[in-house]
Amino acid sequence: MNWQAIRSIYTFEMARFFRTLTQSFISPVISTSLYFVVFGAAIGSRIQEVDGVSYGAFIVPGLIMLTVMTQAISNASFGIYFPKFMGTIYELLSAPVNFLEIVLGYVGAAATKALFIGVVILITSAFFVDLQIMHPFAMVAFLLLTCVSFSLFGFIIGIWAQNFEQLQLIPLLVVTPLVFLGGSFYSISMLPPIWQTVTLFNPVVYLISGFRWAFFGISDVPIGLSLLAIAAFSGLCLIAVWWIFKSGWRIRK
């Protein structure tokens, strides 16, 4: 394992993040505050509690997941797409670095950035609601797995994308709607029976439900299914990345 190569890629990607640290810090704080004003105040005034949890606290896990997923995808996809766009990826492919080291560098940096944003949102939320985390280790595990798995997904999108518009296509048109319809700001038990069944086909439901269980001990689906879902998603992404580098799909002329 070429740790120097991994460290070089990781350091280069993180340096770009630290150059805009103020923007990276302020943006989630403002967006989180707006979510609490809109959802916590407006809707929370009509829905006092959900499954025994105050509505303001109930939306925190979904809010964190929404931002972490989109940030992980965005950071990882841009990180690998930019070398493709500039043509420097061929220097990387010709260097004595294997695909695993490249993935560890780019995905590790993207996951770190998403984790930072998630922690910022968690701290910001504590100023608005009284948060109690029943299973802190499970919460950290779910957060880390989500950061890594969606960074892998973003890496795949960055390889697939052929222009900057395509980088935003799947996050905006697929991931964000799935998160909003996956119980981020409500419990799926509040839906009519037919829509509860339909919602169970949304894979994001299992991630948000498991993450919410780590906070409050309540979930819409069994915790075992949540763990199985994120493990399966991570495995599929790893297989896809392995195939991309083996076949050279969209990274070699």
Image: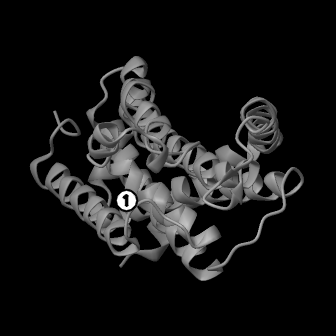
- At x 53%, y 53%, the residue is 110
Where is residue 195? Give x, y as percent. 33, 37
Query: The C terminus lies in which quarter of the figure?
Result: top left
On the rendered structure, is 162 left or right of 58?
A: left
In the foreground, 5 or 101: 101
Q: Amino acid at mark 1?
A: Ile
- At x 63%, y 51%, the residue is 64
| Figure check: 28 above or below 95 | above
Where is residue 93? Give x, y as percent. 28, 51
Residue 179 shows in this picture:
yes
In the foreground, 161 or 134: 134
Residue 96 shows in this picture:
no
Where is residue 248? Give x, y as percent. 15, 45
Where is residue 225? Give x, y as percent. 31, 68
Q: Residues within 10 Å of mark 1 (few under 14, many from 20)?
A: some
| Residue topped by disc 1 | 102
On the rendered structure, is 40 left or right of 66?
A: right
Q: Quadrant of residue 226?
A: bottom left
Q: Quadrant of residue 168?
A: top left
Q: Residue furthest right?
A: 127
| Figure check: 144 above or below 125 | below
Q: Residue furthest left?
A: 247
On the rendered structure, is 22 left or right of 203?
A: right
Q: Quadrant of residue 36?
A: top right
SS category of the residue bearing label 1: helix
